[in-house]
Amino acid sequence: MTKPRREGRAKQRSRMALSPLAHAAYQILRHRVGQADPRITYKELASLLRDTDDAFGYVTHRSRELYAVLGEVGDACQHLGLPPLPALVVRADTRRPGDAYSTGSPLTHPGERTAAWQRDLDAVSQATYPATP
């Protein structure tokens, strides 16, 4: 016998386990949502991660681990049905994300990729992210 469905109750999604580094990056990025300009450079993010925990002392703005962690955070956002927080992370020179942001995207034209990122950035600014993904 099935139980009747309760009205007005949001569907609960299971929590996604993040690595300690991804959890720290998630926290940094989610606290930027709502700022006038929530974007953060890869270098600034790496510096904040190093300041968060001595265990993250190896992270630089060019390290593979940083890019992998942004993918992990993006996956967690997708799991939650939320826009991708990594949209906030940008290059210092262009104030747009690097090429890795659109890896795997079916969009081939740079203008299409930029427009998709802008939509993601706008959506992130309007979203509310839970303290724990």
Image: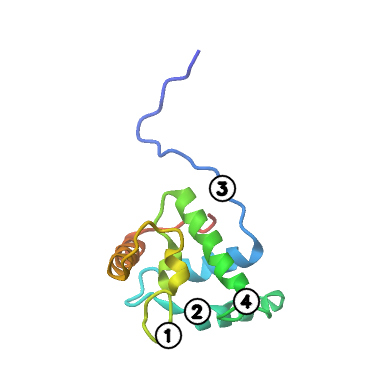
At which x and y percent is residue 44?
51, 82
Answer with the quarter of the image where residue 128 lies. Answer: bottom left
73 relative to 18 in the view: left or right: left
Mark 4 touching mark 3, by CB under 8 A? Answer: no
Kind of residue at disc 3: Arg
Indicate whether 125 appears above or below 48.
above
Mark 4 packing: few (<14 Cα in 10 Å), some, or many (20+)? some
Give the labeled residue for mark 1.
92
Tag of residue 26: none
> Distance from label 3 to label 2 (Cα)?
26 Å
- Identify the disc placed on residue 15: 3
Report if residue 85 is visible in the image: yes
Q: Which residue is mark 4?
A: 52
* Residue 50: quarter of image: bottom right
Per the model, the C-alpha gap separating discs 4 and 3 is 23 Å
Which residue carries the number 2 mark?
A: 42
Residue drawn 37% across and 81% down? Answer: 95
> Residue at left 29%, top 63%?
119
For the residue pair 105 and 41, the one nearer the viewer reads as 105
Q: CA distance from mark 1 to mark 4?
A: 21 Å
Gap in angstroms between the C-alphas marked 1 and 2: 8 Å
**Tag 2: amino acid:** Tyr
Upstream in sequence: badge 1 or badge 3: 3
- Alpha-carbon neighbours of circle 3 within 10 Å: few (<14), some, or many (≥20)? few
The amino acid type, in three-letter code, at marker 4 is Thr
Instruction: Categorize mark 2 by other alpha carbons within 10 Å: few (<14), some (14-19), many (20+).
Output: many
Label 1 sits on what residue type? Ala
- Say few, some or many: other residues with alpha carbon within 10 Å of mark 1 (under 14 / 14 to 19 / 20 or more): some
